[in-house]
Image (cartoon, rainbow, N blue to C red):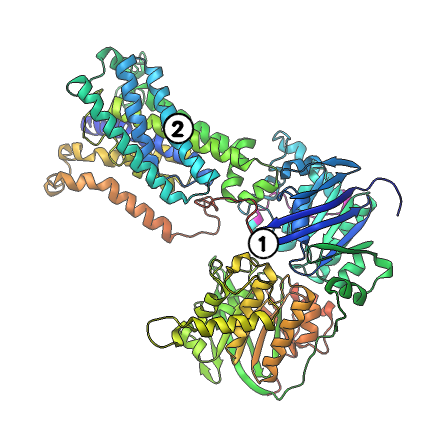
């Protein structure tokens, strides 16, 4: 039982950055922008957040800077695709390449500067320790499973729920959904299509950036691993998770934690004594591959399944040009 | 006409797209409580002009006055603020949302659902509009969608309504219903502009007709003093014969035999249910029906693009079910389907006319290189014969106006001299002159002994051009009637789902 609880706990922790990435991408895709730069924006957030944490020791500043720098990357994407009408796929891929590249290079420079792998102070890290809720956190099983996480786990869930509520109940949410479905209808209804698209892309990108900073600061325990895979493909999983969650950030909460479970299965599978030995002893690389395999399966299923009322925004990936003939 | 302020006053409006002048110093006025029909050939700039009023396009020159005040309209939002409401030819609705959500979209009202629903209900009662607020738009018929569009602009308090080809997709009964609504609006003091190609509708509904030709405003005629002949001549700039010919031909029955054909649509529902009919050679069989009654599936199935669930298609006594499209083309069947967006099927928008000709013929040329010469000659022939308006044959097709694009497509299909020509909506949105060119081309095919399956939307045309008419409703055949005998009203009832029993079988 203890093994299982540890596994559950680890799944939530590894699912959290996925949730940030997925929520951010959902916001962007709801307005019709297919931003494949999630991985890149997470990398930008990872470096910017880590560097700020290392230099300033302020949690607030670290995550604010992570948000702002990734949002800046998203702004670049927004300007290219919304204003200059470039191809969304190519632009997104470019943003990913750019984000990984610049963060890796700056990471090397930072390591050089520090003379070894930079390490965030333990004082800083203690501010991100799991929040102990008196009595509740010490309830057997339940306490550990649901009420003993670092603050950003809760922040991720709250952001996802707030965005789901916005889409369901608010006027702005209705407007954004209309833009993603049929921008010319939204335009004819007097909605400022360009403004909404920009805002969704930028804020969505910023949320992805927080996910990146979560990985470099919390997941990797405050040490920058120069040359290592800080974000390591989580951005791509997030892109697939958007489909898995059928463009609902509320469903993304569950989806992220399921995928989180798969990413950390490799560390726990050996401990599950109830499983037959050959499963426990399979090479670790098979388990490392699992989340990506699952991603592929999700993409295949979603491409086969074509319902009339699909939850995919109808004009996703298409640029809108008002005077198009 | 009084000297009081106009509801709308346009002076010297000019709009240029690249090399094409869509509007050239256009003047237009509308009074409150007046229905103005805007008439003009395709590419004469009607839709462009209305898009300028609704803020979609921005004019390059000219002034707009609303109720006597000069205004600048930069966006649809500005247009709403001036109480202008536009009902576009292609509805601007979000398909997956409900009618209610579509109506509220972009309004400044807080999402107070109860109050909004009450306001909408009051509006609907006032103009006797029927609407189900909770229904999703994608489950609606075309006429219901149009009602949503009308309610949408009325809910925003529009005093000036612009309708772009509103009757193109309606049954005669639905059209009458729409006209009742428009008359109610007129009585309410609203200014209405209606764009349509159908002269009888212009004469029926409008108070005044404004004619555009080649982007210029030609004339404004009071409807009471006009008739179809006067209007056509003003529009085209020359005298024209309004009769559609129906030449008598030698008929060989059962050129095409469709037996108990059932087909599933893209959404998994049955799009055609047990459809049985036949066409003789030298015959035009018309297909009438509300949009989406299975016409598209019928065309595609015969052309070999759609999977058949049940039934047989016999072309010259040979079953062609299961053959590939290229085998079917070789057998002498050709299809030209003009979808609502016109470019969807058959042409590649970014290629020029010559290359679009090549698409159909490249396989016949020898060697690995393309033979452009012949295609270019064909393209130039078509441009001349069908008077396609284009700078030259190497202009990308997407830069041509809708009607000219259609001429390219149907011209190419007819050029291959098929034994069965399937043509859907070939006159969709075309001006009179071009429509007649197309009817003549189709008649020529008939006289050559080909069979023609003509899928149409204008009942007047179907009645005059076709030999027999098949009526579809929800994928079922409501009956096949003799076009010389049937009335428009009967067709309307059949389109709405009333079956007739006789006349289904050809005498052969």
Front residue of B260/A103: it is: A103
**Horizontal relation, residue A201 to residue B336: left or right:** left
Q: Compared to B355, does B138 lie above or below?
A: above
Expressed as whole percent of the image width and height from the top left, the position of residue A302 reads 37, 48
Q: Residue under mark 1: which chain is it in? A: B
Examine the rendered structure and indicate whether residue A223 appears above or below residue B421.
Answer: above
- Above or below B457: residue B123: above
Magenta stretch in the rendered image: B126-137
Q: Main secondary structure of the magenta part?
A: loop
Label 2 close to label 1 by CB (< 8 Å): no
Label 1 packing within 10 angstroms: few (<14), some (14-19), many (20+): few
Report the residue marked by disc 1. B19
Q: Which residue is mark 2?
A: A72
For residue B133: magenta?
Answer: yes
Residue at the image position 49 percent from the left and 69 percent from the top: B262
Task: Assess disc 2: are there few (<14), some (14-19) or many (≥20) residues with their C-alpha within 10 Å of its C-alpha.
Answer: some
**Which of the two discs, 2 and 1, sits closer to the camera?**
1
Mark 2 chain: A
Tell me the residue at 52%/57% (across/down).
B398
Point out residue B508 in the picture as x, y percentages from the top left corner.
59, 88
Q: Nearer the viewer, residue B230 or B309?
A: B230
Q: Residue furthest right?
A: B2
């Amino acid at each position: 039982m203890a093994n299982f609880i540890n596994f559950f706990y680890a799944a939530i922790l590894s699912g959290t950055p996925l949730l940030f990435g997925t929520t951010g991408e959902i916001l962007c895709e709801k307005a019709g922008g297919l931003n494949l730069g999630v991985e890149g924006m997470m990398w930008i957030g990872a470096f910017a957040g880590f560097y700020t944490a290392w230099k300033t020791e302020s949690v607030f500043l670290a995550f604010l800077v992570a948000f702002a720098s990734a949002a800046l990357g998203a702004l670049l994407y927004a300007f290219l695709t919304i204003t200059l009408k470039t191809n969304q796929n190519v632009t997104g891929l470019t943003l990913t390449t750019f984000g990984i590249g610049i963060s890796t290079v700056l990471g090397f420079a930072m390591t050089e500067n520090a003379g070894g792998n930079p390490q965030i102070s333990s004082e800083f890290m203690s501010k991100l320790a799991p929040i102990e809720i008196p009595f509740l956190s010490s309830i057997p099983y339940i306490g550990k499973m649901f009420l003993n996480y670092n603050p950003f786990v809760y922040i991720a869930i709250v952001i996802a729920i707030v965005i789901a509520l916005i889409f369901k109940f608010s006027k702005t949410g209705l407007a954004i959904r209309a833009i993603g479905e049929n921008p010319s209808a939204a335009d004819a209804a007097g909605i400022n299509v360009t403004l909404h698209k920009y805002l969704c892309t930028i804020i969505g990108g910023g949320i992805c950036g927080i996910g990146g900073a979560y990985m470099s600061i919390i997941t990797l325990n405050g040490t920058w691993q120069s040359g290592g895979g800080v974000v390591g493909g989580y951005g791509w999983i997030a892109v697939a998770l958007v489909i898995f969650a059928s463009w609902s950030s509320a469903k993304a909460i569950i989806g992220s934690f399921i995928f989180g479970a798969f990413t950390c299965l490799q560390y726990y599978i050996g401990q599950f004594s109830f499983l037959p030995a050959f499963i426990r002893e399979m090479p670790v690389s098979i388990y490392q591959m699992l989340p990506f395999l699952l991603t592929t399966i999700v993409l295949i299923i979603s491409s086969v399944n074509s319902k009339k009322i699909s939850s995919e925004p109808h004009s996703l990936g298409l640029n809108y040009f008002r005077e198009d003939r | 006409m009084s000297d009081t302020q106009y509801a709308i006053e346009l002076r010297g409006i000019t709009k240029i797209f690249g090399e094409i002048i869509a509007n050239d110093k256009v003047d237009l006025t509308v009074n409150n409580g007046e229905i103005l029909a805007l008439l003009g050939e395709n590419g004469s700039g009607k839709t462009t002009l209305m898009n300028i009023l609704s803020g979609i396009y921005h004019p390059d020159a000219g002034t707009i006055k609303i109720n006597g005040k000069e205004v600048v309209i930069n966006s649809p939002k500005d247009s709403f603020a001036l109480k202008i409401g536009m009902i576009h030819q292609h509805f601007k609705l979000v398909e997956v949302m409900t009618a209610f959500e579509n109506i509220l979209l972009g309004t400044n009202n807080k999402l107070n659902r109860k109050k909004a629903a009450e306001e909408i209900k009051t509006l609907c009662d006032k103009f006797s509009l029927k609407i189900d607020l909770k229904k999703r738009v994608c489950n609606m018929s075309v006429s219901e969608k149009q009602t949503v569009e009308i309610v949408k602009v009325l809910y925003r308090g529009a005093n000036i309504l612009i309708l772009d080809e509103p009757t193109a997709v309606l049954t005669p009964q639905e059209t009458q219903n729409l006209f009742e609504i428009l008359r109610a609006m007129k009585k309410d003091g609203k200014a209405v502009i209606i764009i349509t190609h159908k002269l009888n509708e212009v004469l029926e509904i409008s108070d005044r007709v404004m004619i555009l030709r080649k982007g210029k405003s030609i004339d404004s005629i009071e409807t009471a003093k006009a008739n179809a002949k006067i209007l056509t001549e003003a529009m085209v700039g020359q005298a024209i014969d309004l009769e559609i010919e129906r030449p008598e031909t030698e008929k060989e029955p059962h050129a095409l035999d469709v037996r108990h054909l059932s087909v599933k649509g893209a959404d998994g529902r049955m799009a055609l249910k047990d459809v049985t009919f036949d066409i003789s050679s030298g015959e035009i069989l018309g297909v009438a029906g509300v949009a989406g009654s299975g016409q598209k599936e019928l065309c595609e199935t015969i052309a070999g693009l759609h999977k058949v669930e049940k039934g047989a298609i016999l072309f010259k006594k040979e079953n062609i079910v299961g053959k590939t499209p290229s085998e079917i083309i070789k057998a002498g069947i050709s299809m030209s389907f003009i979808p609502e967006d016109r470019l969807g099927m058959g042409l590649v928008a970014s290629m020029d006319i010559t290359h679009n000709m090549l698409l159909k013929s490249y396989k016949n040329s020898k060697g690995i290189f393309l033979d452009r010469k012949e295609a270019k000659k064909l393209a130039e022939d078509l441009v001349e014969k069908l008077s396609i308006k284009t700078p030259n044959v190497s202009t990308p097709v997407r830069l041509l106006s809708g009607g000219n694009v259609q001429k390219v497509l149907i011209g190419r299909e007819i050029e291959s001299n098929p034994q069965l020509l399937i043509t859907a909506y070939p006159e969709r949105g075309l001006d009179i002159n071009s429509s007649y060119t197309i009817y003549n081309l189709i008649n020529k095919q008939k006289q050559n002994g080909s069979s023609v399956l003509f899928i149409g939307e204008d009942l007047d045309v179907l009645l005059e051009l076709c030999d027999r008419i098949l009526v579809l409703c929800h994928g079922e055949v409501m009956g096949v009637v003799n076009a010389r005998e049937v009335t428009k009203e009967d067709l309307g009832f059949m389109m709405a789902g009333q079956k007739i029993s006789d006349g289904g079988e050809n005498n052969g």
